[in-house]
């Protein structure tokens, strides 16, 4: 089996699901907060005092700052992908998945991107199940330990 990873993200949070190579291995799920601020820029604002800031925020500067923060966020996400990952899927509700895809194609060419999919908001368990289903992996079964009564 190949090492496979799924990433659910929006501009606030990302969950990286690293599936194990062995069918009975442990699935590792990491949560990453972006720290990207989503606010509107106010152009040509000026304090009423003569010693306050005079330049104001121009739209270009705010967009550049946001672009830099997004790129930092995407690089944090790549830091949580297992280094031996061969196949990857990116999914989520926002356009952030396409920014991550572009950075992947630019800097991480060894990984094979199988898809960029739209998905709704999900819980961590739903994200894990979605990734398992995407790669055709069954859910891990938990069998009772020998010597202990089976409870249902």
Image (spheres, grey):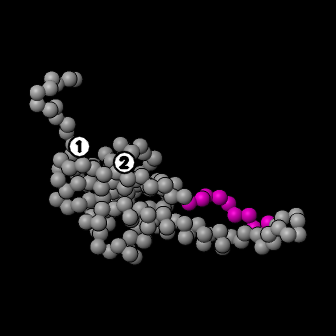
* Lower sequence index among marks 1 and 2: 2
Residue at the outermost left position: 146
Residue span colored magenta = 36-45
Reply yes or no: does residue 35 show up in magenta.
Answer: no
**In the image, residue 102 above or below residue 22:** below
Q: Is residue 131 visible?
A: no
Task: Tell me which residue sits at (11%, 31%) in the image.
Answer: 146
Q: Please tell me which residue lies in front, 30 or 89.
A: 30
Please provide percent x and percent y for residue 62. 65, 68
Q: Is residue 141 visible?
A: yes
**Distance from Cα at disc 1 to Cα at disc 2:** 13 Å
Q: Which disc, if any, is residue 55?
A: none
Label 2 crowd (10 A; few <14 / some 14-19 / many >=20): many
Q: Secondary structure at mark 1?
A: loop
Q: Are marks 1 and 2 in contact (CB under 8 Å)?
A: no
Tag 1 residue = 139
Q: Please tell me which residue lies in front, 103 or 77.
A: 77
Please provide percent x and percent y for residue 58. 71, 71
Say left or right for 51 vs 112: right
Tag 2 residue = 127
Label 1 crowd (10 A; few <14 / some 14-19 / many >=20): few
Q: Secondary structure at mark 2?
A: helix
Secondary structure predominantly adopted by residues drawn in magenta: loop
Among the 4 quarters of the image, the one containing residue 144? top left
Q: Quadrant of the N terminus?
A: bottom left
Task: Tell me which residue sits at (19%, 56%) in the image.
Answer: 21
Say left or right for 140 vs 12: left
Q: Please tell me which residue lies in front, 147 or 26.
A: 147
């Amino acid at each position: 089996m190949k090492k496979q990873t799924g990433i659910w993200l929006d501009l606030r949070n990302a969950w990286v699901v690293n599936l194990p190579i062995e069918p009975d291995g442990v699935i590792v799920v990491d949560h990453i907060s972006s720290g990207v601020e989503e606010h509107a820029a106010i152009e040509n604002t000026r304090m009423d005092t003569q010693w306050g800031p005079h330049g104001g925020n121009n739209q270009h500067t705010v967009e550049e700052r946001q672009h830099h923060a997004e790129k930092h966020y995407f690089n944090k996400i790549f830091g949580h992908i297992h280094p031996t990952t061969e196949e990857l899927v990116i999914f989520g509700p926002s356009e952030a998945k396409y920014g991550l895809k572009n950075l992947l194609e630019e800097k991480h060419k060894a990984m094979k991107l199988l898809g960029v999919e739209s998905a709704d908001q999900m819980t961590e368990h739903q994200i894990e199940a979605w990734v398992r289903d995407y790669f055709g992996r069954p859910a891990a079964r938990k069998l009772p330990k020998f010597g202990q009564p089976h409870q249902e």
